[in-house]
Structures are given as C-alpha cells and as structure tokens.
Amino acid sequence: MTSDDFRAAAHTAADLAADHLAGLAAGPVWQPMDDAARRTLLDAPLPAAGRPLDELLAAVGRDVLPYPMGNGHPRFFGWVNSAPAPAGVLATLAAAAMNPSSAGGDHADVHLERAVVRWIAELVGFPHPPGGGLLTSGTSMATIVCLAAARNRAARAAGWDVREDGLAGMPPLVGYVTGETHSCVRKAAELLGLGSKHLRAVATGPDGRLDPAELRAAIARDRAAGLLPFLVVASAGTVGTGAVDAFDPIADLCAEERLWLHVDGAYGAFGVLDPEIAHRYAGLARADSLALDPHKWLGVPVDCGCALVRDPAELRAAFSLVPSYLRDEAAGELGWFSEYGTEQTRPFRALKVWATIAHRGREGLAADIARTTALARRLGELVTADPELELLAEVQTSIVAFRLRPADPTGPADEAALDALNRELPAAVQRRGRAFLTGARLDGREILRACLLNPATTEEDLAVLLAEVKAAGREHSG
C-alpha cells in the first residue's frame, strides 16, 4: 500500500464518519436489524484473499454504519451511553496510527496520560499526587484496580500478605454498599476473592442516599462477629436515579473506623461541574479512591475509564511487578503505568481524552453538563404535570426515574398490572424508533429511566419521548 492509497482511503473514511454523524438526528434513534443485514455480519466467511481498502470502506458504509446502537441521537435516553465528542473521534485515528503500548517509557502517550489524568482529577476536585491514577477500559476495570488496593491495605494492616499468601485463612473482609450500587462493584468483589456475601447492602433514606446511621450499625455488627470491615462504596450518581450520596458524614465514619472510602463516579462525578448541583458533591475529595468514566458524560469515545487514588503507593503495592525484560532504568521514581493496574499492553487512550477536554475546555464541558441537568429537571416537571405519568425519585443529576400510570376510572391502579406494563414499555418505545429509553427496578417497582447526556437534546425531544411512552402504552393496552 502506498501513502497515496492510504490518504485516499482515509479521506473516504472521514467522509463516512462525518456523513454518519450529520445524519443521526434525522433518522430513527434505533430499529431492529432485519434478518438479512444481521446474517451479513454473523455469517461473514473468513476471507482467503485480501480486499482493497475502498471495498472495505464501502462495506462499512453499507453493512455497519446504518445500524447504530442509537447513542449518538439526541433522543437516545438509554442506559448511560453518550454521543461521541467529535474531537475525540478525530484523535482516535491519530492514536491508532501511532499504536503504542502505553505501559511506560519516554514517549508522548505516557506523558499525555499523566497530564489528562491530572486534568480529570482537577475537573472533579479530587486530590492528585503524582502517579495517583491511570486510564482504564472503563469504571468496571477502574473499580477492580481501586478495590484491589483497598483489599491489600486492609490485609496488610491485619498482618497478611495477600499477594504472597492469598486470602485463605484470613478473617473475611467486609465491604458496604447499597441496593443501588453498580454491579461492577460486586463483580470486583467476586474477582478479588472477597465474595459477594461479604458485601453488605446498607439501607438508604427516602432520597436514595446511603444512611450513615445504618452504615455504622452494620459495621458494629460485623466487628462483633469477628469480621474485618474494610471498605465503603459511595455513589456520585446511581445508575437507577442519579442519586448522590452525602460524602462528608460517610467520610467521617470511614476515618473513625479506618475504612477505605471508594466513590463510584462512573456516570455522575462530572456533575460537580454544574454550579446548580455542585453542592451535592461536598466531601467527594475525601475519598481514598474514585472511579469514573470520561466516556460517559464527557463524551470521550469508548473505551475510557479512570481510576484516581489518594495514595499512589497503595496501587503500586497491589500491582507492581517488573520482570527483567521490562526493566527501564530511566523510568524515574514513578515507574511505568503497568505497575499501577492489571494491564501490561495498554492502548493510547489519552489522546482522545486530551482532544475532548482541550476542544471544549472546562467552561464548555461545564456548560454541556449544566444543559443536560437542566433538561432533566425540566423532564421531571413535565412528568409531574402529566396525570398519566408518575415521577418516582427526585431528579438529582441528569437521570429521571418515572413510570406510566394510565388513569383508571374504575378504581385504584393494580400494582402488578402497572409493573407488567412498565416492564414492557422500554422495548416497545425502542421499536417505534423515535426515542430510546430503558427500564430498571426501584424499591420493588418497574420504572422507566431516561438518562440525559447529549447537550444537543432539546425540550422538543423531551416532549417526543413522553408522547412515545404514552403511545406505546396505548398500543400495549389495546
């Protein structure tokens, strides 16, 4: 392949990407793939001979780009998946062209990662000593990294060397979560050998936030039983409702009980940039670790999570292993990123983070986030004002939890029937193609949840969403 061949193909790829992004709002948010299109991808034979780049790009434009997940559309309100930031899309190509391993060494990606991790910490107001964090595939991996450091610190304090001896024979380490804590925390506890039965689900208050009094009581019970409490996981925005825990009283208790405070900020931590809701995050900086996803509210293209820790030495104590073939005498006192997590070969994630943040700047990012939280509050008002809808939780960040509750002139609504209806509604709305939302369970009830992350969303899009929910409900009832 000549450089001219590549240049021509790159221009074609850029046009494909630009046309795709430009056309998203005019098309359906999402629709099921037809069988023929699905089989084209599933049954693709292993090619015996290569194909020219122009043929490959034509196939991408024909067989892939017309069938998106939908998250680039301004009426996509599902899960916590953002539209890609254009600057991040462009930077991804340059990062792939370099294709380094960002494990360590003296090259641009390593130094840029140290810079953008510091930027992320500054954006959310978290302390950042040199070496105090790294980029990961997402918060699921960042959570494993942070909880491994917490586990090792607790074991060391109890006289155990987990890396050498494992957990066998040690009194169980106990962590504390809530019923709304993201499932990645349980996965991390299971993977790290802690066992999900040693994660205590602490009660929350009416506002959906962890109750410090209930937490204190649970810790006391476990200490009395001879167990070793070591971890509290608080949330900077639950996935179900966007609730933000009260960090200061939890941090006070963790300091008193010598527990590691980890904050799951995957979705919500960047909400602190919105002055309207920044007060909810008071005390976030007191955590021992924070996991968050630039690929959510900031719009950095997937994959990109981040683990931040107050004490970098705890990460290195948990992960550092430098075989002779990876010695780098010029690495300096911080060593390599591969000493702070599980990945050895690490992709160049930093460039798309750098481009996304640098393109918008702190002020631009804050404005984007403030717009989505304001729209979420407006959606909450629209739900409250509609007699057929019911708001199920205070709108704290940019997630709105509600349900369809059609008027029943014959008497009170049947809860089982309401549950059945609202369980079916997300898929029904999705199939209609004009809006996309997902569901969950909250306090034993089926809910609809709309997550607003796209600053291109308008109030008209909110009206379309609610109209689609009610239309799908009428179809279901009919």
Image: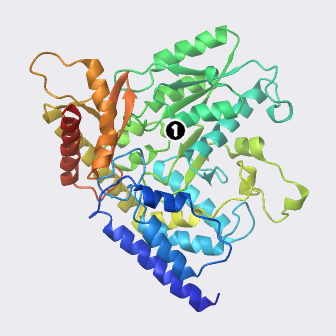
Q: From this viewpoint, is residue 55 visible?
A: yes
**Residue 45 position by quadrant:** bottom right
Q: Is residue 286 left or right of residue 441?
A: right
Residue 337: % across, % down: 71, 56
Name the spot of residue 443 as percent of width and height, x first.
37, 22
Q: Is residue 327 visible?
A: no
Q: Is residue 325 above or below residue 251?
A: below
296 above or below 385?
A: below
Count of labels in the image: 1
Foreground residue, 241 or 437? Answer: 437
Residue at 55% x, 31% y is 233
**Residue 362: x %, y % from top left:** 41, 60
Q: Secondary structure at mark 1?
A: strand
Nearest to the observer: residue 418 or residue 267: 418
Residue 15 at x, y percent in the picture: 42, 79
- Label 1 belongs to which residue? 264
Image position of 346 with respect to 382: above or below: below
Q: Residue at x 64, y 49 (%)?
A: 132
Compared across the picture, whether 285 is left or right of 165 comes to: left
View extreme (top): residue: 224
Q: Which residue occupies 66% across, 30% down?
A: 190
- Residue 332's quadrant in the figure? bottom right
10 Å neighbourhood of mark 1: few (<14), some, or many (≥20)? many
